[in-house]
Image (cartoon, grey):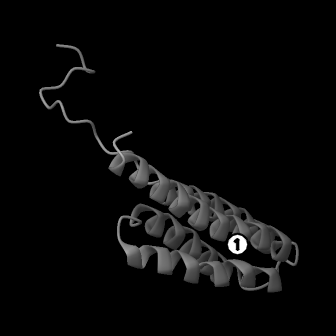
Amino acid sequence: MSRETTDDATPRPPRSARRQFAATVLVLEAFVVFFATLVAFGLREGNPAAIFVLGGTLSLSMILVAGMLRWPAAYVAGSVLQVPMVAIGLVVPLMFVVAGAFVVLWVWGLRLGARIDRERAERAAAGG
């Protein structure tokens, strides 16, 4: 029996587009925060330990929330994490632009993903 053939004949439902978009944005933001942390450290913008603790905590939080997106509260947490992402601009001014672009991607991904999921459900309900 090959890997494609299973005993269960029921197809798996498609993954949520909203969840995929949100997870992608959060993981990419985690990388951006990590690199912004390195920039803040390189510019000697404060206590190195504080910079790494704050940047590392924010990066790790984004990755953890990306993994928890099966629960609705994780979308709220992801939205809340956008605030400190933008606040990094107070230390690294270019982050206002980068974080602003990611906030737009976050909102757009949630809205578009929800619409795709809704259309998929409608199509499945119509039998197509």
Q: Position of residue 117 (x, y in %)?
A: 46, 56
- The image shows residue 107, relative to residue 91, as above or below, that is above
Residue at point 63% right, 75% down?
55
Residue 10 lies left or right of residue 21; in this view the side is: left
Q: Nearer the viewer, residue 41 or 4?
A: 4
Residue at point 72% right, 62% down?
35
Residue 101 visible in this rendered orientation of the protein: yes
Residue 43 visible in this rendered orientation of the protein: no
Quickly name the residue at label 1. 103
Residue at point 40% right, 49% down?
15
Image quadrant in which the N terminus is located: top left
Residue type of the residue flagged with mark 1: Val
Q: Position of residue 6 (x, y in %)?
A: 18, 25
- The image shows residue 79, relative to residue 126, as above or below, that is below
- Local SS, label 1: helix
The residue most toward the left is 7
Image-quadrant location for residue 96: bottom right
Q: Position of residue 54 (x, y in %)?
A: 61, 80
Q: Position of residue 53 (x, y in %)?
A: 58, 79
